[in-house]
Image (cartoon, rainbow, N blue to C red):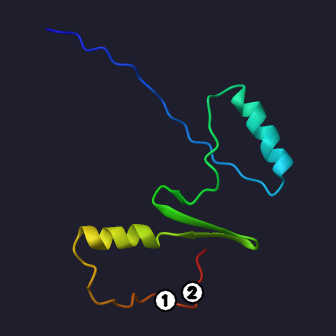
Amino acid sequence: MPLIKSDLTSIFCIIFGSTNEILCEQFVKAKQGEFEMSMMGELNYFLGGQIKQFQHGTFLSQSKYCRELLKKFDMENCKEAATPIATGCYLD
């Protein structure tokens, strides 16, 4: 029986950000000494979610993911339906 040799490779994803560019540069320099890493620039998509960064905050959306699901299951032209939800109640 032949032996199969494989190398295990781990990929870790570190996402960081700051409004202070100097802190970002210091963080990159510190981590590049420990890890092989590359700067990918502004984050737009992560784990199926769409990320838009504005001056007043960050907006997270799954609209692209939802459109892809609708397309996958041939439901792009289906009619929308309201989803009823209770209002005015509080969770403990």
| Percent x, y of residue 78 | 26, 86
Q: Quadrant of the C terminus?
A: bottom right
Q: Quadrant of the N terminus?
A: top left
Residue matched to label 2:
89
Q: Label 1: few (<14), some or many (≥20) within 10 Å?
A: few
Disc 1 on helix, strand or loop? loop
Which residue shows up at 62% across the image and 43% down it?
Answer: 14
Q: Quadrant of residue 75?
A: bottom left
Which residue shows up at 28% across the image and 80% down it?
Answer: 76
Between residue 65 and residue 92, name the one nearer to us. 65
- Residue at the far left: name it: 1
Disc 2 on helix, strand or loop? loop
Is there CB contact under 8 Å for labels 1 and 2?
Answer: yes
| Percent x, y of residue 59 | 62, 71
Q: Label 2: few (<14), some or many (≥20) within 10 Å?
A: few
Which residue shows up at 64% across the image and 43% down it?
Answer: 39
The three-letter amino acid code for the residue at tag 1 is Ala
| Percent x, y of residue 43 | 60, 56
Between residue 90 and residue 74, name the one nearer to us. 74
Residue matched to label 1:
86
Which residue shows up at 52% across the image and 65% down it?
Answer: 50
Q: Quadrant of residue 20?
A: bottom right
Q: Is residue 43 above or below residue 51?
A: above
Apparent side of residue 56 relative to residue 91 in the rendered image (left or right): right
Q: Is residue 59 above or below residue 46?
A: below
